[in-house]
Image (spheres, rainbow, N blue to C red):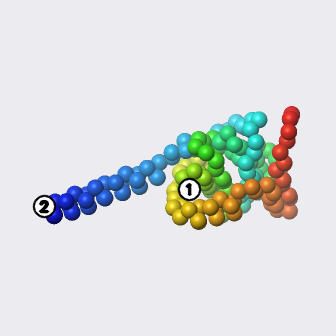
């Protein structure tokens, strides 16, 4: 009887672990690239730049617009996050989306393909990551300074 319970426990552990791994590999954010500039009245939540000098501005309605270093629109990313998010480019020009609610980091290529996911399980590490990456309002790229300012009214 003990062997059966032990075997059942191991089988359940393996099955549950595989389900969790499969879920993290999916594009649960419905992250996609669009070639139309997103225009919105929602506030900007962050700014980041890649190594090519492209500047990205993220908005609270789950869109990120990307512009070249001359300010010309290139493309947008659209996605769906429950709660707030942070974003940045990594050193391979992939875009990282951090979802504050569940502590997940999603790495996407410039073509909106999911590369990998990481979960920050430790609450202290998650809080530290959020504090170090939130409220980014200024950016310097190739000697050009960019600053996000809240515009009240149109």
**Residue 93: percent from left, percent from top:** 65, 58
- Secondary element type, mark 1: loop
> Can residue 54 be seen by looking at this rendering?
no
92 or 43, which lies in front? Answer: 43
Tell me if 78 is positioned left or right of 11 in this view: right
Q: Could you say which disc has been placed on residue 56 in the image?
A: none
**Residue 119: percent from left, percent from top:** 52, 59
Tell me if 137 is positioned left or right of 99 in this view: right
**Residue 84: percent from left, percent from top:** 64, 47
Q: Residues within 10 Å of mark 1 (few under 14, many from 20)?
A: many
N-terminal label among 1 and 2: 2
Q: Residues within 10 Å of mark 2 (few under 14, many from 20)?
A: few
Q: Could you say which disc has been placed on residue 1 in the image?
A: 2
Q: Residue at x 86, y 62 (%)?
A: 143
Tell me if 2 is positioned left or right of 104 in this view: left
Quarter of the image that includes the N terminus: bottom left
Q: Which residue is mark 1?
A: 103
Quarter of the image that includes the C terminus: top right
Q: Residue at x 80, y 44 (%)?
A: 72
Q: Residue at x 65, y 59 (%)?
A: 130
């Amino acid at each position: 009887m003990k062997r059966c319970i032990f075997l059942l426990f191991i089988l359940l552990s393996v099955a549950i672990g595989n389900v969790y791994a499969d879920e993290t590999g999916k594009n649960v954010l419905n992250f996609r690239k669009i070639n139309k500039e997103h225009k919105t009245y929602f506030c900007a939540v962050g700014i980041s730049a890649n190594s090519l000098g492209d500047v990205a501005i993220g908005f609270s309605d789950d869109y990120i617009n990307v512009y070249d270093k001359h300010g010309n629109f290139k493309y947008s990313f659209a996605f769906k996050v429950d709660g707030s998010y942070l974003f940045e480019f990594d050193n391979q020009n992939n875009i990282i989306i951090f979802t504050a609610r569940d502590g997940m980091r999603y790495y996407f290529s410039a073509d909106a393909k999911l590369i990998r996911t990481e979960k920050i399980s430790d609450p202290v590490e998650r809080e530290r990551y959020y504090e170090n990456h939130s409220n980014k309002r200024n950016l310097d790229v190739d000697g050009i300074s960019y600053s996000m300012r809240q515009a009240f009214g149109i």
